[in-house]
Image (spheres, grey):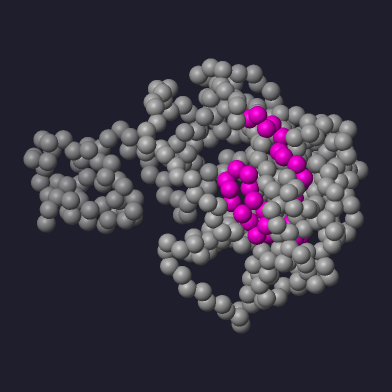
Amino acid sequence: MNLYSHLTNCIRSNTNRDFGIKLFRSLSFAPTCLTTLSLPQLNKCELSTSCSLNRHPGIIHPRPVSRYWAIGKMRDPFQYTVDALPLIRTGGRGPDGKIQLKHVTTGLNRPWFMVDHNRSRHASTKNIHEELVLQVKKTWWRHPFIALVASGEVKRWIIATANMKPGDIIRSHVDIPAIPVDPKEGDAYPVGALPVGTVISQFEIKPGQGALFCRTAGSSATVVRRGKYVGSKLSEELNSTYSNIELEDEYVVFVRTNGKRKIYRLMPTCMSVVGQVSNQRHDQFKFRKFGEKKWRGIKQRSGLWQRKTGRFGRKIRPIGPPIDLASRKSSPDYFKLKCSYPGRSEYTMRKEQDMYEALCAQNIQRPQPVPGPYNALPDKMRRYRWCSWSSVR
């Protein structure tokens, strides 16, 4: 029996298996101790340990933790508010103290606002929903500008478009006519109601879920194809009923993002916002000093400039096949088998489709607070307090 197996058996007999292995790996032995100690003496645990073991005892978590644990402590995910909230900077570490995000550090104490990305909450009423823009402002933690809009007694923050200004009235439409409409920037329309060539942003991938794409500063997409049966009665019946029949290209809309050169196959009822996202010149922003990145919670890597070589080259490739996001889920008594292998376009398309389906399922489970009347900050939430030049964790 060697020394490693003997120590492992001794620790397993007294402690938990996982904790015992961690304890054994953190032990530090001097060369003299290994020569003088015998096996019976090792059972008495007369071994010198490092100081790190005494300072940081082992913590065993029953399940993996998320990096959003600090934000969940500070606010109620089911309560919406338009007031400023404090944002906790974790420094890239989780509740167990381990690094989860490498180039993240602490930042300044700046307010954080809850933004509502859903423009289709009124779809069940079949009426046009109007809102008044009260304020357009720039925040510290978001690249695009945000706008405070109100409708009756309900206020909420939304992502502002390029030409949105205070005093404008924005509308959210529901109907999908057979003839495309004349869109207005800032208004929300179903993608099936827009003509080909319309510049949109903040579009949904599932009807009623909320915008997931084109939400950053300066991003946009373009409607490249509209099926000839979009807006007809047959298209409305197919969209309202969950049948096992796959929708053909004549009943869906194709949207191409202007940044990543990807084409998405969407349902006509997916809501989108006309226009480009505000703060288009965000890509020209430059930091004024070295410490400004730390203010925003970015850990600086290196200031040494090095010329790029051929290793950083990119080949210009054509746009890939459309990513199908308009497919229906089949019932348990209906199965469709399609075989493919890595390297083909069908295999890559199916892999990306599964990824977006998993993303969709994850966002459905995530709670989305609904703005209500007089949605001020409740007493159970921590209020934001200005503290200049103070770093928070």
Camera-side residue of 284 and 123: 284
Residue drawn at x 61%, y 80% as measured from the top left: 334
**From this viewpoint, which residue is outermost toward the left?**
35
- Can the viewer see residue 361 in this picture? no
Tell me which segment is drawn in magenta: 254-282
Where is residue 328, by image quadrant? bottom right
- Can the viewer see residue 140 in this picture? yes
Camera-side residue of 257 and 378: 257
Q: Position of residue 295 (x, y in %)?
A: 56, 24
Classify residue 286 as left or right of residue 48. Answer: right
Query: In the rendered structure, does residue 125 fall within the stretch colored magenta?
Result: no
What quarter of the picture does the N terminus occupy?
bottom left
Camera-side residue of 379 and 204: 204
Residue drawn at x 10%, y 35% as measured from the top left: 32
Residue drawn at x 12%, y 36% as measured from the top left: 31
Residue drawn at x 75%, y 48% as measured from the top left: 198
Camera-side residue of 293 and 3: 293
What quarter of the picture does the C terminus occupy?
top right
Q: Position of residue 147 (x, y in %)?
A: 78, 35
